[in-house]
Image: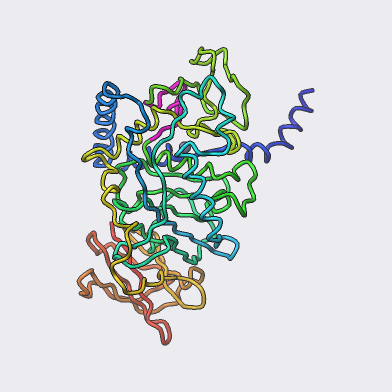
């Protein structure tokens, strides 16, 4: 029997990897907090004021949906593709926008599947999403940027958020929700920042094949709910179990939960050893749990409250209320094509970036550059270092911290790359 079980586990292991939703947002965010004392302070402050606001508004709460303003969030989608299959269609992008607008407005087709026990808590969150009409310079845009990239896979290291590392820079995150759609490595579905993140990283990252409802290969995640979940984090919602054994999501009307749910549970999902002894059991159909897309159906009134707290005066998402991204463009010049660092053109890549002691130089991301002379300039254009590139590596020990440009002559071409010395 034991050996049968073992074989079964072996056979099913790839299935289990594919079947269990994961979300690395908490892990990602914890590492951001660990590495940035200022961010840590901002976030602690945000959480404590969110709690204060929450208790004030609870006293005033009539909880009538008509009292809750409808907020429209301008969105920019950065599609990063290495092959044409990853360069998803406008229809696929629009299908994701439709899902967000249904899920956050309680207009989703599957609200009837919310168990009657939890139905009174299900909320229209009064936020909706629209592709930007104007870019940060006021030029006309579709709200979709397509950029070819050399990278085959992406990790939760934010490289997709920076042109210098083959991604695409965020649009001003005070006024846009930035969503990067890219070929995240197979173990990742997506991740998000929480409010308070540094502006150039603020936004959501989603794996191409779980974005939208068309053209997907992953059947458990083909209903666009990964993006609903990650945008939930971007709007300050936590996992129901607080990412610890019976932890808290700081929302009053979601029952306590021992840990995440998997697949599709049946109601009521109770656990004799759990922390939730209420008859309804776990709220496994909440968008902030880990059930399959087909079994996620609702946010709660308490979650809506937490979302709307973010738009209060001086709260971190307030600036979105003043965004002009959905206004008609006022600048008639054409938007520049995104700077594409791949394809036939030669280019220079440097890494690590930021770097502290040395830079490795690559030509078209492949070959190490053969010995050539190089010149390094500071941000004012002053030559600060020059020498011979031997073996594709350049020592930058002599530089102080800052932004620099490295220039190489390669045959007829002049190659330039920007880097940060830390
Ligand atoms: Zn999550």
Q: Is residue 165 above or below residue 10?
A: below
Indicate whether residue 399 is drawn in magenta: no
- Nearer-the-camera pick, 251 or 305: 305
Looking at the image, residue 345 sits to the left or right of residue 335; the answer is: right
Q: Main secondary structure of the magenta part?
A: loop
Name the quadrant of the C terminus: bottom left
Most extreme residue toward the front, as rendered? 66
Give the color scheme: rainbow, by chain, secondary structure or one colour: rainbow
Q: Is residue 414 above or below residue 225?
A: below
Q: Residue at x 32, y 32 (%)?
A: 67
- Residue 381 place in picture, x, y as percent: 22, 74
- Nearer-the-camera pick, 75 or 151: 75
Looking at the image, residue 109 sits to the left or right of residue 54; the answer is: right
Please report the bounds of the magenta region as a residue range: 237-250
- Residue 50 place in picture, x, y as percent: 28, 31
Name the quadrant of the N terminus: top right
Q: Residue at x 43, y 74 (%)?
A: 347
Q: Residue at x 52, y 62 (%)?
A: 81
Most extreme residue toward the bottom, as rendered? 412
Residue 284, quarter of the rendered image:
top right
Mark count: 0
- Nearer-the-camera pick, 158 or 287: 287
- Residue 18 place in picture, x, y as percent: 63, 41
Q: Residue at x 37, y 50 (%)?
A: 177
- Residue 138 place in picture, x, y as percent: 30, 65
Residue 233, quarter of the rendered image:
top left
- Nearer-the-camera pick, 407 or 283: 283
Indicate whether residue 249 is drawn in magenta: yes
């Amino acid at each position: 029997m034991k050996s049968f079980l073992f074989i079964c586990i072996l056979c099913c292991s790839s299935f289990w990897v594919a079947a269990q939703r994961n979300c690395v947002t908490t892990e990602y965010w914890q590492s951001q907090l660990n590495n940035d004392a200022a961010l840590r302070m901002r976030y602690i402050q945000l959480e404590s004021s969110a709690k204060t606001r929450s208790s004030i508004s609870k006293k005033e709460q009539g909880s009538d949906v008509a009292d809750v303003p409808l907020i429209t969030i301008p969105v920019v989608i950065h599609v990063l593709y290495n092959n044409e299959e990853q360069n998803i269609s406008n229809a696929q992008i629009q299908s994701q926008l439709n899902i967000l607008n249904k899920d956050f407005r309680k207009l989703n087709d599957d609200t009837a599947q919310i168990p009657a026990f939890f139905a009174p808590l299900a909320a229209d969150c009064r936020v909706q999403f629209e592709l930007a009409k104007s870019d940060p310079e006021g030029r006309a845009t579709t709200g979709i940027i397509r950029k070819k990239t050399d990278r085959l896979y992406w990790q939760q290291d934010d490289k997709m958020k920076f042109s210098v590392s083959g991604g695409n820079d965020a649009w001003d995150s005070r006024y846009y929700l930035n969503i990067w759609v890219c070929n995240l490595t197979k173990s990742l579905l997506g991740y998000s920042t929480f409010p308070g993140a540094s502006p150039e990283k603020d936004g959501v990252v989603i794996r191409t094949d779980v974005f939208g409802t068309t053209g997907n290969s992953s059947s458990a995640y083909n209903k666009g709910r990964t993006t609903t979940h990650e945008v939930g984090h971007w709007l300050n919602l936590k996992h129901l179990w607080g990412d610890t054994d019976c932890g808290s999501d700081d929302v009053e009307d979601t029952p306590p939960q021992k840990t995440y749910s998997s697949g599709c549970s049946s109601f009521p999902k109770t656990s004799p050893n759990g922390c939730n002894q209420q008859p309804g059991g776990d709220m496994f159909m909440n968008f902030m749990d880990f059930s399959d897309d087909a079994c996620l159906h609702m946010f709660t009134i308490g979650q809506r409250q937490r979302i709307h707290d973010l738009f209060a005066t001086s709260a971190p998402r307030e600036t979105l209320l003043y965004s002009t991204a959905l206004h008609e463009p006022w600048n008639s010049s054409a938007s520049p094509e995104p700077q594409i660092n791949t394809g036939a053109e030669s280019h220079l890549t440097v890494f690590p970036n930021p770097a502290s002691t040395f830079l490795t130089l690559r030509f078209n991301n492949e070959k190490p550059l053969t010995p050539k002379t190089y010149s390094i300039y500071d941000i004012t254009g002053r030559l600060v270092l020059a020498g011979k590139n031997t073996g594709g590596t350049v020592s930058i020990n002599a530089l102080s911290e800052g932004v620099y440009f490295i220039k190489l002559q390669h045959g007829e071409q002049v190659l330039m790359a920007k880097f940060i010395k830390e």
